[in-house]
Image (cartoon, grey):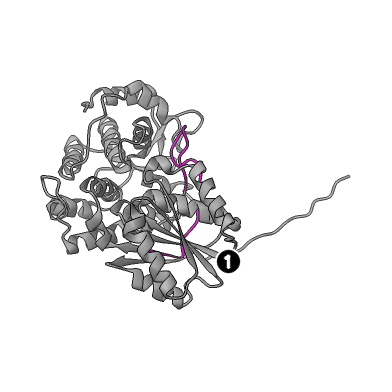
Amino acid sequence: MSRTFQVVLKKVVDDSYAIEIGELLFDSLIADLQQGLVPNVSKYAIITDSTVEPLYGRPLLERLRQNGFAAELFSFPAGEASKTRETKALLEDQLLNRAYGRDSCIIAIGGGAVTDLAGFLAGTFGRGVPSLNYATTLLAAADASVGGKTGVNTPVATNLIGLFHQPRKVYIDLAAWRTLPAREFRSGLAETIRHACLGDADFFSYLEENMGKVISDRGQLVLDAGVCEHIALANCRIKYEVVEQDERESNLRQILNLGHTAGRALEALSGYRLLHGEAVAIGLVVQAKLGVKRGYMSEDQAERLIALLKKAGLPTEIPASISNRQLVDKMYTDKKVRSGRIRFVFQDGIGAMKCFADGSYSIPVEEADILAALEEMPRM
């Protein structure tokens, strides 16, 4: 005879946090810590990469120490190729060797790879410690600032290992955008265009009209202050409107994967020579081509999307080194795959997403249909 004991663990959790958008926000971060934003913390670990370390990591370390905070800096080689379980383990060992424990706070300062990796580390270290995100790139501002999704890449697929861990606050430093190489900035524009495609037709039109105010036809950064602020706010708003309704990606939040089914596969197959946003841009074109064939968007709408991506200086063609067969095979590692079938989320025109008869926002697509669409795409 057996007996059962029921463990009841119902609770209400408030994971709300603020996103501050502005220029040179170190003073604001310091003031927040002084005012108790993250209570019961005795040590701060700044996690960054080798590119951001001299520009922002070390200056923030000095500011924290000057204001009486115990802090140290931990850095890893820049690039998506470093966003791995191995890098996370190395950082964890470094923290443990420096006697960091559950009374610590992680400050992630950098782009999307940094916030993804550091957020994952914060969510598991000591079974979870608080973290702050200080976004220095448009990509981080667009993709990693809202939602709490963290993760690392593996040889098989990108971002399949991770967890949800909400930061206590996010700082988006628009001044840091001026330090970015144009290619890195364009990568962030891909995620911005994706947000417009999935959630705001007016914002899509705004980008069509104002793209030249952030990057010139020759690929030089212009970065009009008002347009940059509008882009940052719109990115946060659109993503928030989705995450608020589906924090754990049970259905609706899948729409944020627009462009990522093919995009993540391309990114991995390129050996990360394609930046994340560059791969997503091509992925947006793949779903648009499929969407036109299925009647979800018109040819004119697809051409508007392609034209805007090109105006941002982003690629819209598949690299010649990657075969269609390789690309389809790699798509099977996407998080949306169910029962061995590749699934896509699709635009419903521009500014909205297709919801299907069963209430789902993703739908299985046959290999033959994907291959047919890929055959129509030019190569670079």
Task: For residue 369, say whether it is visible.
Answer: yes
- Which residue in the rendered view is the most extreme toward the left? 217
Q: In this view, does 97 lie to the left or right of 156?
A: right
Q: Which amino acid does label 1 sit on?
A: Asp
* Residue 221 is covered by the magenta coloring: no
Residue 114 in the image, given as x and y percentages of width and height? 41, 51
| First to last magenta residue range | 151-170
Residue 143 in the image, given as x and y percentages of width and height? 35, 51
Residue 315 in the image, given as x and y percentages of width and height? 22, 37
Q: In what element is the residue under mark 1?
A: loop
- Quadrant hosting residue 359: top left
- Say which residue label 1 marks: 103
Does residue 340 sit above or below 145 in this rendering? above
In this orientation, which residue lies closer to the viewer: 67 or 295? 67
Does residue 335 sit above or below 90 in this rendering? above
Does residue 65 sit above or below 194 in this rendering? below
Q: In which quarter of the image is the N terminus?
A: top right
Q: In this view, does 217 lie to the left or right of 183?
A: left
- Which residue in the rendered view is the most extreme toward the bottom? 35
Q: Which residue is drawn at 51% across and 52% down?
A: 121
Q: Which residue is drawn at 45% across and 29% down?
A: 341
Residue 164 in the image, given as x and y percentages of width and height? 50, 53
Q: In this view, does 215 lie to the left or right of 7?
A: left
In this orientation, which residue lies closer to the viewer: 257 or 71? 71
Q: Quadrant of the C terminus?
A: top left
Q: Which residue is drawn at 19% across and 38% down?
A: 306
Principal secondary structure, stretch drawn in magenta: loop
- Quadrant hosting residue 132: bottom left
Task: For residue 149, say whether it is visible.
Answer: no
* Residue 152 is covered by the magenta coloring: yes
Q: Residue at x 16, y 52 (%)?
A: 221
Q: Residues within 10 Å of mark 1 (few under 14, many from 20)?
A: some
